[in-house]
Amino acid sequence: MSPSCNRGFTLIELMVAMAVGALLVLAAMILYVPVSRSLVDQGVVGQQTLSEAVNYDFDVMNTANAGYGIAAPQMNTDVVLVTGSGPGNNTPVAIPAAGSAQGNGLFWDWTIPAGGATTSCAGLQVVAGANGHGGNERLVSYEEVPGGSCTAAALDTAANWDIETVLPSVTPGAAAPITVTAAQNCDPRGSQIVGNPVLHPLVSLQLPIPPLLTGGFFAHLADQVPVNVCLHNLP
């Protein structure tokens, strides 16, 4: 084959290679935008998920303390369900011995060490947002002030509590986001007893979460996250 034919084939191969390379560059450019947006969205979702996980885990761990160390903990005494806008404006909601009740706040107490003389208490409530956002909701955590009381009267006294916002104002969700259901097979250890599992009250919370992503593949609007807590210290 003559040298001129070899040069012709080489030129054609070069042109084909350049065309394939151009197509690969074009494909990479087309994929860059959605892939980069996806990575950014995943980063934001990751930050939100971590923040929410810390808050929710904190709430769950504390709620599970209800009744710990108390000789004979009772519903409506050591676990109190309420509806209202916060201490000083709450109304107790009776939790029946069988069945369930709903509210927007929960208060509970415990004793450490078990059987000790000092009783501690805390609360969790979904209330109207602050700073002009009255139509929205925020999740707040209540801790008794130093020297505070865990008596029935103190549970609804605003001065008895330090208030900390766990999540900021978000779009309103359920009017009664906390449900307490009696006599549930919710403890993994108690459920192992065949034919006669140990039953405990179950707290189901629909906690509000803020909308951080309003577009893209991972778009996330205001929503609620379900959290279940088994009160294994109470019968």
Image: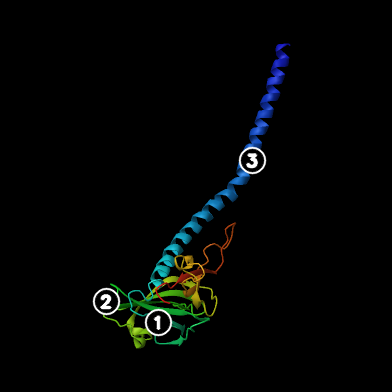
Q: Position of residue 89 (x, y in %)?
A: 43, 87
Which mark identifies residue 116?
Answer: 2
User: Which sits earlier in the primary sequence, circle 2 or circle 3?
Assistant: 3
Question: Is 222 in front, or is 107?
Answer: 107
Q: Where is residue 142 in the image (x, y as percent from the top left)?
A: 37, 77
Type of amino acid at the residue the image marks with label 2: Gly
Question: Is 6 in front, or is 72?
Answer: 72
Label 1, secondary structure: give it: loop
Work out whether 3 lies above or below 220: above
Q: Quadrant of residue 25?
A: top right
Label 3, secondary structure: give it: helix
Residue with the most extreme front position: 195
Residue with the most extreme top position: 2
Query: Where, quadrant-wise, is the C terminus in this rendering?
Result: bottom left
For the residues labelled 2 and 1, the Cα–Cα distance comes to 17 Å
User: Which sits earlier in the primary sequence, circle 1 or circle 3?
Assistant: 3
Type of amino acid at the residue the image marks with label 3: Leu
Disc 1 + disc 3, Cβ < 8 Å: no
- The crowding category of the residue bearing disc 3, from other C-alpha atoms within 10 Å (few below 14, some 14 to 19, many at least 20), is few
Type of amino acid at the residue the image marks with label 1: Gln
| Residue 227 seen in the figure | yes
| Residue 84 seen in the figure | no
For the residues labelled 2 and 3, the Cα–Cα distance comes to 72 Å
Q: Where is residue 220 in the image (x, y as percent from the top left)?
A: 56, 63
User: Which sits earlier in the primary sequence, circle 2 or circle 1?
Assistant: 1
Which mark identifies residue 74?
Answer: 1
Front tag of 2 and 3: 2
Which mark identifies residue 164?
Answer: none
The residue that label 3 is drawn on is 26
